[in-house]
Amino acid sequence: MGKTQSHIISSARELTQNKQLKPSGFWALGSGNVNEFDRWLVRKLLDNIGKPPLSFLLWNNEEITSPDIKPHARIRIRSRYALYKLLLNPELNFGDLYSVGSVDVEGDLPSSLVDIYHALGRVNGKSLLSNFTRPAFQHLNSPDKARGNIHHHYDIGNVFYKQWLDRDAMQYTCAYFPGPAMTLEQAQTAKMHHICRKLRLQPGQTVVEAGCGWGGLALFMAREYGVSVKAYNISHEQIDYARHQAAATGWSQQVEYIEDDYRNIKGDFDVFVSIGMLEHVGIENYQQLGAVIDNCLKEQGRGLIHTIGRNRPALLNAWIATRIFPGACPPSLSQMMHIFEPREFSILDIENLRLHYVKTLEHWLSRFDQNIEQYRKSYGEEFIRTWRLYLAGSLAAFTSGNMQLFQVLFTRPHNNDLDWSRAYLYQNHPPV
């Protein structure tokens, strides 16, 4: 077994350790007849999640749905223990129970989750006992904590990600689909052009990138726009891959990949760009990020931050925050202003690409599904169910409007070298 494969299997076990999902004592009453109290609990659960068009199928095959609701799909609960776990902490335990097969969805998974998001929106997301089980704060993302969080998700093996991300640049962020029929590769290329044009990149400029992923954007900016790039990232696997790519394509002199925290960015640059990193920074660190940008951005410089976001401040789904992206918190626009306002940066443009992320996730999930049998042999069923729920849940979150995708363009307040319209973004667009 290779190092990468062993790492992925080990990480899959980490995702589900300490879940304590094996029943004992009273909790072992998972088989046997369904009683009236069980039925009452299921109806109460349906009420508390807004009566979505779904039914619950219990361990004796008894089906329960809300009155006058035609279900689109069924959620199978395989034991009384699973039912009680679901009631005690639905946000966290639904994902845990689904991952190990104690709860299943019979029907289209993304569509079923969209139905749940829409229903929860009608009741402001309040579920039975959730106020007592939801964490009241986010863990502070110190440099050491941030490195561990990134390792948890991104350092599980480049081979795994290459199987379902775009082949050209391995972009693990929202693509841009000017034409709905574009391939994923075309849309990711269009996304990189879109960002570069917003930043008005010119040959000879210097760019710093905070959180560079596998390095595809930095190489693209150097190759297509003639700039020099310093790209920072704390994922060792990603930095190692990026450096090899730069060396193999002959761009090492123009693109430097630095394995370090964004807080340690040094130098003066014409452009600051960050794509898909802000979600991991932590709201409490936004003013510090603003200070980093202020210290490194030249007087006429521009910056762009591309991030998953929310319509209003809220904590990330408990299961995603615990099992998938520890320490992550997608911000609202008002929270993002804590980066810009203390340093008096001027906002030039805000664009929401939510529906572009829906299409991106459709491509990712389809490619993931094409490799299911290989994953089953290599990583196991629990790993598959965990990652498929994560991708399907993300697709549902953006489809339902629970999540947004913001691109925020900014500069210093005294910079008058500005465009009169957005026409420059779309005229003579480079071919993709």
Image (spheres, rainbow, N blue to C red):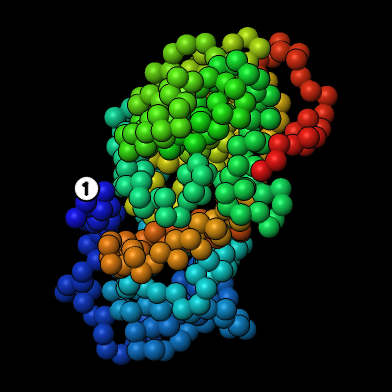
Q: Quadrant of residue 347?
A: top right
Name the amino acid, label 1: Lys
- In the rendered view, tell whether residue 326 sits above or below residue 366: above
Residue 243 visible in this rendered orientation of the protein: yes
Q: Position of residue 247 (x, y in %)?
A: 40, 29
- Residue 188 lies, in percent from the top left, at 58, 45
Q: Residue furthest left?
A: 25
**Quadrant the C terminus occupies:** top right
Quadrant of the frame with the N terminus: bottom left
Give left or right: position of 220 versus 10: right
Q: Residue at x 17, y 72 (%)?
A: 24
Tell me if residue 156 comes above or below residue 287 in the rendering: below
> Which residue is at the front of the view, 46 or 356?
356
- In the rendered image, residue 232, in percent from the top left (x then y), is placed at 42, 26
228 or 351: nearer the eye?
A: 228
Q: Is residue 139 visible?
A: no
Residue depicted at 42% across the width and 55% down the height? 163
How far across and how far down the image is residue 327, in percent?
38, 40
Which quadrant would residue 75 be assigned to in this image? bottom left
The residue wearing badge 1 is 3
SS for dot 1? helix
What is the crowding at mark 1: few (fewer than 14 residues within 10 Å), some, or many (at least 20)?
Answer: few
Q: Residue at x 40, y 74 (%)?
A: 104
> Could you tell me which residue is drawn at 62 percent across and 48 percent down?
186
- Locate residue 409 relative to residue 45 in the image: left or right: right
Image-based side of 258 in relation to 396, left or right: left
Q: How many tags in the picture?
A: 1
